[in-house]
Amino acid sequence: MLTTTIEDGIATLAIDLPGRSMNVMDWDLAAALDAEVARLAADETITGLILTSAKPAFIAGADLAVLQQVAGTAREIAAKVGEMADVFRRIETSGKPVVAAAPGTALGAGLELMLACHYRIAADAKGAVFGLPEVKLGLFPGVGGTQRLPRLIGIEAALPLMLEGNALSPAEALAAGILDDVVAPEDLLPAARRALRESRVSPVAPWDRKGFALPGGAPQSPRIMDAFSLLNARMQAQTRHLYPAPEAILACVFEGTRLPMDTALRLERKRFGALFAGPQARAMIRTLFLTRQKIEKRSRAEGAKGLLFFSKAKADAAGIEDEALVRALEQVGYARPSPIMPSDGFALYASRCMEAFIEEGLALLREGTPSAMIENCARAAGMPYGPLALARALGRAVAGGDGAAPTTPEAVKRRLIRAQSTAAASIIMRLAADHDEADLAAVLGWGFPSYLGGPLNQMEENRT
Amino acid sequence: MPDAYIYDHVRTPRGRGKADGALHEATPVHLATTVLDALRTRSHLDTTLVSDVIMGIVMPVGEQGQCLPRIAVLNAGYAQETAGVQINRFCASGLEACNLAAAKVMAGQADMTVGGGCESMSRVPILSDGGAWSSDPSIAFSTYFVPQGISADLIATKWGYSRVTLDALAAESHRRAARAWSEGRFARSVVPVMDVIGDPLLERDETIRGNCTPDDLGKLKPAFAELGAKAGFDDIALLRYPEVEAIRHVHHAGNSSGIVDGAAAVLIGSREAGIAAGLKPRARIRAFAEIGSEPTIMLTAPSFAAEKALRRAGMEVADIDLFEVNEAFAAIPKRFCEALELDPETVNVNGGAIAMGHPLGATGAILLGTALDELERTGKGTALVTLCVGAGMGVATIIERV
């Protein structure tokens, strides 16, 4: 997993997880790094360390299958994540200068490990990307990322990278100040050694030096306070209070950048524990990552170029008729077929579920619920559109009823989601299809909100 | 419980709160000193009787920071024994200061106090104090924070107030304020702010435009449309109020309160303290109340505060002759009138903050004095003063002439 070679007092630690095409960070790797760095730090003949990878990529991120197994209370999760964050912190404070030399991609915890090193070099490798994409799966960089990135490049530059999760090319990461140097692939380790030999690498992180000031403005400055106010609003509008990760990222940065590093890191892991003790990130990891991997693998095996859902399912006569609805919705820009490969099974499934959503909206309207309430509640529940807008787009009559059923926004949201779940459950039974597959198909197919995992996951959550 | 009486009230004229405003060269301490000095001088007040000076200051930072009321007490030459304290209840700070000043008297823990407020918005701009509400993510999210302008537009949307209606209300505020000045209705209370050589910097409220028409106002661009759409505040409001189809942005610089500089002070004391000072009480403070309400719509609490104060006083809406409700935005007095089913002819009869401006910390005390002057002018008996307040609060005070 970890091979150390020592040359002229410089120890190079190459990460190489056996049996995997890419390195991923988990607790075993962290423990191995911890022991090895401690051993080398105690060796007086060692003048510097280089962390690198024996694979084309540096580290692709945390091992999400392993992370998904981390359960328990917020306190227990915080403690578990803290174990890894403490390893990173010990690398940062080992007393030896540590260079991260990435031959390729470093994402998530991989980039967080690089941030805990004192100098960061990347090879100018084709396709290599650097970023903190955790937010896309309902998570945030929880092993120091929310604290080190703003301290390195400033709060205003760091927040969008974590809130949007977009990856940067080596050149972009260099320009952003995340990397110190980008070199030709064959020059990666020589460049790392030169940096150490030329004493360009301080063994003390900038934020551990006396008088450290955050680049780009202190968190208390009016400019940064205003930036937070605007981002708080934008993220509330975007997440509709359904996806907790952006708020947690903002809070980690707002509160953490006012604190000394060790206190800030403790704060970050508590936030991570609180977040991951909730259902949203687990549902998103399950559906958007683990299920997606499964479907991708199967689709490839079946020779499909995109994601192929329900390929084995046979649609009946009703399915053909229903397909028209999905086609119609595609044409008006609602259903999102990409990257889904159309199949009869998918068309039937999507049609039935969207029909149920539309019908529930029309039923609410007939009962006397104001149309604004129905449409706003659909969006507030995480749907990308309201059922009445869909009905109108399909050219259906949308007429209010004279009922006066007193409905709370909560009840409207619940009904609009439940209608889809009920329809999904019944059609999946008929298609004899896999639940996970159906959940991902709903999220990618018509924008069912991913924080719920999918219509079937949502139903199971409600039952327990 | 001793009753608390109002013995006197003074305010500065309100100057445009910008670098070209007439009061821009006056420090906030000088504004506060001006009203304290006037109270003392015109009543020949023995200031050793004054236990405390409580002033609302909403941006208590920089030269307006520390504990400005105590500094102004010293600067105004009050007795050394007179203490001072600054309070902040956002826009109702000036009224809250008077309520607390009265409460000290009613509780028997002070015989004579001053309530009031001071704000130099041209020198210490709004939002100078930072604060957690919008910036701290945990707070902004949990409270569904939106700026007040969005809340005002939400109110107008929810209750269907058109731009035309609100512009007419704003023009009427200017008309009434201009009439009040031309008839000398503010003469008893307004004291000029002087410069160091004894010349007046400002003698009249600076922002009134008596010839302002609804058509003029109709040309102004909505102030909060872009903020609402781009920053996402409209979406946040709709999350809380899904029954509203979309926020209609109807407020603008002309039908919202003006940014101005100003200060006010109200002399409050027990019956005995008045006798000791040789002063005649002008009104009794019957009751007051503060209340919190839903913070995203934020600005509908004046009616709730008024109802609470009325209950405390054992009074009905019909028992009140005159209302002053702060014109933070045109929708606020409109909603207040509707909620309490009031005749608009009894509300803000001499104009309000749309015409004359809203010096944040001082406005509540100004409104209290304006109501009292008008009761005396018209020979009426009771008045209720109220303001909407950030984060969904409201404050109301009921006075009665004696």
Image (cartoon, helix red, strand yellow):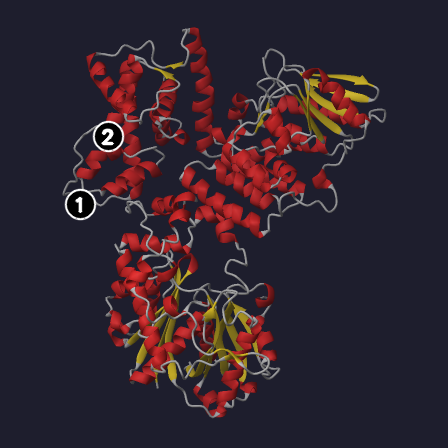
Extreme residue toward the right, this view: A45
Q: What element carries label 1?
A: loop
Pointer 1 residue: A404
**Res B60 quadrant in image:** bottom right
Q: From the top left corner, tell me how far across and down residue B202 is, in percent.
A: 48, 76
What's the residue type where badge 1 is placed? Answer: Ala
Pointer 2 residue: A393
- In the rendered view, would you say A27 is above or below B65? above
**Res B386 quadrant in image:** bottom left
Q: Distance between the residues labelled 2 and 1?
A: 26 Å
**Res A391 quadrant in image:** top left
The answer to whether one can see residue B374 in this image is yes
Q: From the top left corner, tell me how far across and down residue A250 is, in percent.
A: 53, 41
Disc 1: CA contacts within 10 A as few (<14), some (14-19) or many (>=20): few
Pointer 2 indicates a residue of which chain? A
Which residue is rendered at x = 31% and y = 72% of the image? Answer: B175
Which residue is rendered at x = 33% and y = 84% of the image? Answer: B376
Earlier-in-chain disc, 2 versus 1: 2
Left or right of A317? Residue A264 is right
Left or right of A338? Residue A373 is left
Q: From the top left corner, tell me how far across and down residue B360 is, in percent.
A: 46, 66
